[in-house]
Each structure stands twice: as C-alpha cells, then as structure tokens.
C-alpha cells in the first residue's frame, strides 16, 4: 500500500492511528518524494506537539505557519509544480493530524501554511522546521506560499514556439550575493539574493517584503531597503520606527547609507551580514 492510500485510509478512519508509521514499516523501497514527505511531516508534527497551547476552557492553538528550511541542493530539486505539490500535500495531511492532536478540544486554527525556504548552512538531506506565531505576536496574517510576481515572470521567461507547440523556458535567477541572518547569537539562515534591491521587515497582509524577519514585534513591516548598484556597492536605507544600526552606529531614516560585506547590520533582535560572491562564482 502506498503512502497516499495509507493517508486516505487514516483520514477515512479505517483502523489506522498513524499513516506515517504504517508507511515507515513497509519493507519495499519507497520513491524519493515519499521518503522526503514522511521525514518532513514527522518533524512538523513534532513541532506541533511542542508548540500547541490549550488554555483552560478554550480551544487548542497551534502555529498557523511552518517554514521548512532546505539545503541549497535540496531546494534545487524541489521547484515549480513539484514544490507546490509537496507544500499542498503537507498542508493537507498535517491539518488532519492537528485535529487528532487537539483531541476533544476544538481547534482554533482553520488552516495551516507550509512554506519551503533555503538555509545555505544546511547540508544535502538536512532540514529544519520553524513555527511562526506571527498573527498572535504582531497581529498580522500568515504568510502564503510564495508565488512568482508578474514582473519576475516577464524578466525571467522566454517563450519558444515550434510546430504549434508552445514551450516556456524559465531562466534561473542569477544570485548576486547572499545575506546571513543571525538572532540571539545563532545563525538562522543564509538567503541568496537575486534582485538588485530588496525590502526587509516583518511584512504583513498589505506589505510584502523580500527578506522577512518574523517573530519580533519591534521590527517594522517595512524596516529597511538594501540595494546593490551597478558597481557592486551596497546601500542600506532605514525605513522603520525602531532604529537600524550599522556596526553599532544608528543610520539616518530615508538616507542611503553605504555598507560593506561583513558589516554588522542590527535590526532589533536580528543581525544581518552581506556575503558578496567570490570572483570565481560571479
């Protein structure tokens, strides 16, 4: 019996307490996506159990969003429809599992968001799961799975038509540099940057940012803008209510400030460092 059939039987209540356990006990080789699915689903379920809150007389609360960080190599293997299928499958099975975990208590969450992102510090086959209580901490909404913007599609797509058959070829975005994100002395992730200008902040339903810093209500929805000019120089423009520091010195609001790779950029509880690409990688 395959993974999907096990899940289907479990959802239908056919004497299966845990479909993932049944799949784990199978001796026949599984496809790569099944192995990956089961490993991630188990880790997100473990995070759910650790994070769940059931106040006396109230419903059970769970994080609405789970960010799964992959290595650069694994991220390249899970792109496009393959990525969306994995995210959708995880959302479906874990929403059902959440109802089981809440028991007889009503579940406050109506839906869950699973999003795959990149952490350049991970090795192939490694991943980590980060829960996001964004709505409860800051009053903003959950982050939806990323969708390519119209301008990006226009920039990175070429269409070739041959014998009545249209083929869309998507060019891979070129990585210009990367940004290390640190918090409380620990490196959280390394984010590759493919745009000459990015926005940084907490984000919200109405304000989308390229580099989200979630979990700290002192970070503004749009806190700063980081730009790289055609000569390879970096410029940081402060936009938030709380200060932005470069090497311990507060920068002026709305005035581009030059920054260099490895400068320490402090935004509330987060520290950012630019990693320029080596000449051999450019």
Image (spheres, rainbow, N blue to C red):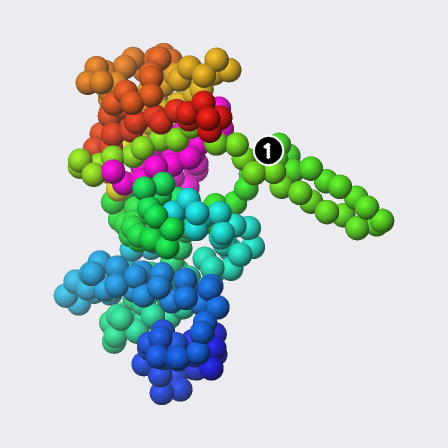
The residue depicted at 81 percent of the width and 46 percent of the height is 162
Q: Position of residue 101 (x, y in %)?
A: 27, 71
Vertical placement of residue 218 versus 4, above or below: above
Q: What residue sits right under mark 1 in the picture?
A: 151
> Can the viewer see residue 113 in this picture?
no
Farthest residue in the front direction?
Answer: 280
What residue is drawn where x is 51% and y is 55%? 84
Q: Residues within 10 Å of mark 1 (few under 14, many from 20)?
A: few
Whole-percent x and y of residue 110? Answer: 37, 62
Residue at left offset 43%, top offset 21%: 227
**Magenta span:** 187-213
Image height of 72 relative to 107, above or below? above
Looking at the picture, how far across and down is residue 186, in whole percent?
A: 20, 38
Mark yes or no: residue 129 visible: yes
Q: Is residue 79 above or below residue 25?
A: above
On the rendered structure, is 2 left or right of 166? left
- The answer to which of 183 and 119 lies nearer the viewer is 119
């Amino acid at each position: 019996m395959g993974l999907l059939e096990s899940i289907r039987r479990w959802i239908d209540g056919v004497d299966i307490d845990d479909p993932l356990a049944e799949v784990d006990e199978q001796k026949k080789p599984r496809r790569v996506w099944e192995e990956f699915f089961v490993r991630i689903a188990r880790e997100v379920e473990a995070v759910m159990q650790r994070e769940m809150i059931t106040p006396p007389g109230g419903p059970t609360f769970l994080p609405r969003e789970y960010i799964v960080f992959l290595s650069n190599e694994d991220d390249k293997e899970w792109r496009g429809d393959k990525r969306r299928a994995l995210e959708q499958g995880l959302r479906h099975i874990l929403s059902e599992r959440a109802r089981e975990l809440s028991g007889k208590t009503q579940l406050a969450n109506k839906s869950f968001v699973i999003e795959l992102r990149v952490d350049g510090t991970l090795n192939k086959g490694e991943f980590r799961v980060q829960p996001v209580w964004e709505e409860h901490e800051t009053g903003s909404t959950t982050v939806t799975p990323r969708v390519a913007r119209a301008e990006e599609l226009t920039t990175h797509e070429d269409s070739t038509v041959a014998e009545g058959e249209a083929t869309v070829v998507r060019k891979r975005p070129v990585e210009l540099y990367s940004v290390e994100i640190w918090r409380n002395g620990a490196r959280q992730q390394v984010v590759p940057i493919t745009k000459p200008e990015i926005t940084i902040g907490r984000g919200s339903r109405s304000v989308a940012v390229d580099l989200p810093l979630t979990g700290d209500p002192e970070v503004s929805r749009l806190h700063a803008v980081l730009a790289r000019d055609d000569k390879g120089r970096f410029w940081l423009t402060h936009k938030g209510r709380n200060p932005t520091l470069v090497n311990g010195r507060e920068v002026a609001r709305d005035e581009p400030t030059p920054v260099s790779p490895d400068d320490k950029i402090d935004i509330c509880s987060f520290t950012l460092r630019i990693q320029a690409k080596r000449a051999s990688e450019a």
